[in-house]
Amino acid sequence: MALLRSLPPGTRVVVRHRLDEGFTDSLGDLLAVDDHACTVRTRRGDDVVRLSAVTAAKTVPPPPPRRPRR
C-alpha cells in the first residue's frame, strides 16, 4: 500500500485488514513498513499486518488527552 510506505515512522494511523473471520482495524503509531508487512503499535501491543491483507489505511489525529480521575 503506497500510503503506508510514504509515511514516516511514528505517524498515527488506522489500518483495516482482512482476517479469516472478517475485518479488523489496527489503530496506533506506525513503527515500520517493508515489502510484505507493516507494524502498528496499538494499546494492546504491536500488530504486524501483511500488506496483502490491507484493505484501507489513513492517518488519524492524536488521541485526546486523558481525563483526570475524580
Image (cartoon, rainbow, N blue to C red):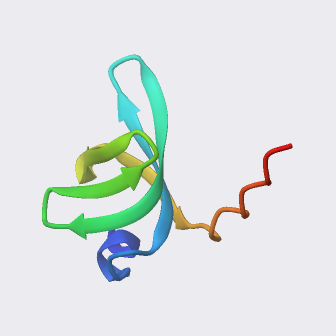
How far across and how far down the image is residue 40, in percent?
35, 56
How far across and how far down the image is residue 67, in percent?
79, 54
Q: Which of 31 and 64 is in front in this view?
A: 64
How far across and how far down the image is residue 21, in percent?
40, 17
Q: In this view, does 51 lie above or below 23?
A: below
Instruction: Please name the residue shown 72% across and 64% down the image.
Output: 65
Q: In this view, does 12 lie above or below 6?
A: above
Q: Which of 52 and 29 is in front in this view?
A: 29
Q: Which residue lies furthest to the top in this view?
A: 21
Instruction: Please name the residue shown 86% across and 43% down the image.
Output: 70
Instruction: Please name the residue shown 34% across and 82% down the image.
Output: 8
Q: Residue furthest left?
A: 35
Count of numbered marks: 0
How far across and how far down the image is residue 44, in percent?
41, 39
Left or right for 36, reference 41: left
Left or right for 37, reference 27: left
Q: Quadrant of the N terminus?
A: bottom left
Q: Which residue lies furthest to the front in this view?
A: 70
Instruction: Please name the residue shown 40% across and 74% down the image.
Output: 3
